[in-house]
Amino acid sequence: MLADVEGDLKITLGEKFFFDEEYILLLELAITLIKWINKIESGEIVDFYYESMDYEDEPILAFKVNTDSTWHLFSVWQNFNDSSHIFLEELIQSTKAFITHLAAHLTTNLNIDISNINVESHRFVGWVETHKNL
């Protein structure tokens, strides 16, 4: 099922598209983000690193902590080098907004409840009526 939920992913930094790619496995990304957020919220400050089963290039997306406790973004497909310093709260808020938006879309359009996915095993434990690309 992870490979069935794909779509466009656009990330802006300021007014520019830092990342703008089609056919990203959005559910796979969301699960990886949820795992990372869970670690961060339990006090474990770790970099985020997303690689995909669909691509050999990696990382598709990474958040790396700087020595001043701010974060920067990196991707093998980035449109420009990120020299900005992002605060963790902003990064968490943005990633949670993405997950919430994706979850609402999956529930409404595909009858997939993201809360029924065991993020540790990437295993869906509910029923899927239909598979469509986002």
Image (cartoon, rainbow, N blue to C red):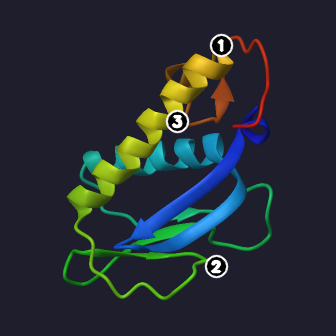
- Residue 66: x and y in percent read 29, 81
Residue at the spot of label 2? 76
Residue at 54% x, 44% y: name it.
Answer: 30
Residue 131 vertical placement versus 25 (above, below): above
Q: Amino acid at mark 3?
A: Leu
Quadrant in the picture for the N terminus: top right
CA–CA distance in space, label 2 to label 3: 23 Å
Q: Nearer the viewer, residue 49 or 104?
A: 104
Number of residues whose C-alpha sits closer than 10 Å to that of mark 2, classed few (under 14), some (14–19) or many (20 or more): few
Pointers 2 and 3 in contact (CB under 8 A)?
no
The residue beneath circle 1 is 126
Secondary element at tag 2:
loop
Quadrant in which residue 53 is drawn: bottom right
Name the image quarter holding the C terminus: top right
Q: Quadrant of residue 84?
A: bottom left
133 is higher (above) or lower (below) than 109? below
Left/right of residue 80 with respect to residue 44 in the rendered view: right
Please tell me whether mark 3 or mark 1 is closer to you in this view. Answer: 3
In the rendered structure, which amino acid carries the disc numbered 2? Val
Left of 1 or right of it: where is 49? left
Labels 2 and 3: the sequence-earlier one: 2
